[in-house]
Image (cartoon, grey):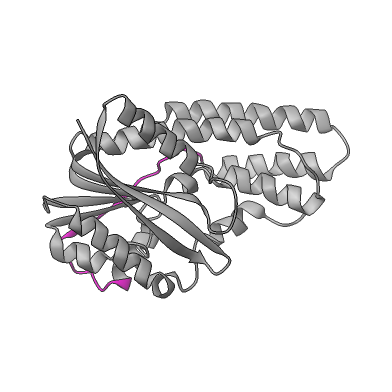
């Protein structure tokens, strides 16, 4: 199979026309954030990307400092250019990887998955190598340092990120399933375990870095479809445990439909929390 799945998936991270199509969603979400903020000293956007879902012009006009944090520096630069904020002294960009998996490791995984699905020899060996690689990546993710600093930002935004951090492993597997028409959940449990680790680590690091309000948002599901979204499930579960344990306060909730793509609209839940 000649298709380079990983590289094609990376290209799909850019959604054509998102800034224009998400205009109403962006305004309502940003309005919710502004209306629930009490101190406008600073706000950090984790997983900022191009900020198609958060209105940077509004944030820049309200806050003394707006910090964009994402693995893709070029996307953040495109974002501030999109909002004509290149020369703003209020905007800061920070490149940061939340996961720790390198491109070469995704390509190694893709090679093994293709071998497992599309060759008839050494299938047992390919299976063992896939599971072994996923075990190694799980350990790597668990040990990967994720620290943003205690009370580094007055406010923070963490929206639509949990479902996207560790998405490639599952997507590569699912695409091979679709091509072959097979039903095989060999890697699913291991990926869920990874997502559980990622959600706990990311939530903990962002909460620790936020002095006042954290605006956290995740997909409850796709409109008209049954089932929750991987990554978002673990994020919600971790937040619920923190609330039950008395580690964080909950102050408000907001729900909105995210017109992500023409054939995929997410039911989103946003909550405003703070640590105790």
Image coordinates for residue 108, horizontal then vertical, percent: 64, 40
Q: Residue 27 is drawn in which quadrant?
A: bottom left
Residue 159 in sight: no
Q: Residue 240 is drawn in which quadrant?
A: top left
Image coordinates for residue 147, horizontal then vertical, percent: 30, 34
Residue 100 counted in the magenta span:
yes
Q: Residue 34 is drawn in which quadrant?
A: bottom left
Please tell me whether residue 134 is drawn above or below residue 157 in the rendered image: above
The residue under the point 18% across, 37% down is 151
The residue under the point 53% across, 58% down is 223
Assign the magenta stretch its main secondary structure.
loop
Residue located farthest toward the right when viewing the structure as drawn? 120
Image coordinates for residue 76, horizontal then vertical, percent: 34, 60
From the viewer's side, name the closer residue of 163 and 2. Answer: 163
Residue 119 in sight: yes
Image coordinates for residue 266, horizontal then vertical, percent: 49, 57
Indicate left or right for 222 with 128 as reference. Answer: left
Indicate left or right for 78 with 118 as reference. Answer: left
Q: Quadrant of the C terminus?
A: top left
The residue under the point 59% across, 55% down is 225
Please count the marks in the image.
0
Q: Which segment is the magenta one?
A: 82-101
Residue 275 counted in the magenta span:
no
From the viewer's side, name the closer residue of 153 and 75. Answer: 153
């Amino acid at each position: 199979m000649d298709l380079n799945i990983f590289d094609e998936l990376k290209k799909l991270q850019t959604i054509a026309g998102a800034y224009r199509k998400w205009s109403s969603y962006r305004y309502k979400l940003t309005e919710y954030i502004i209306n629930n903020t009490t101190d406008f000293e600073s706000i950090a956007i984790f997983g900022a990307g191009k900020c198609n879902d958060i209105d940077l012009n509004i944030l820049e006009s309200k806050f003394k400092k707006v910090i964009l944090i994402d693995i893709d520096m070029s996307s953040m630069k495109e974002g501030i250019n999109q909002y004509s904020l290149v020369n703003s002294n209020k905007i800061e960009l920070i490149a940061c990887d939340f996961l720790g998996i390198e491109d070469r490791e995704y390509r190694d995984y893709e090679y093994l998955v293709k071998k497992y699905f599309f060759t008839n020899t050494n299938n047992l060996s390919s299976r063992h190598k896939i599971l072994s690689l996923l075990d190694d990546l799980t350990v790597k993710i668990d040990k990967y340092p994720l620290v943003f600093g205690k009370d580094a930002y007055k406010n923070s935004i963490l929206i639509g990120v949990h479902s996207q951090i560790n998405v490639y492993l599952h997507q590569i597997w699912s695409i091979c399933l679709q091509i072959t028409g097979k039903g095989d959940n060999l890697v699913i449990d291991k990926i869920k375990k990874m997502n559980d680790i990622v959600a706990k680590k990311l939530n903990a690091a962002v909460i620790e870095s936020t002095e006042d309000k954290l605006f956290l948002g995740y997909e409850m599901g796709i409109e008209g479809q049954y089932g929750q979204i991987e990554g978002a499930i673990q994020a919600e579960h971790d937040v619920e445990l923190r609330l039950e344990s008395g580690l964080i306060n909950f102050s408000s909730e907001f729900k909105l439909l995210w017109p992500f793509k023409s054939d995929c609209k997410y039911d989103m839940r946003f909550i405003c929390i703070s640590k105790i």
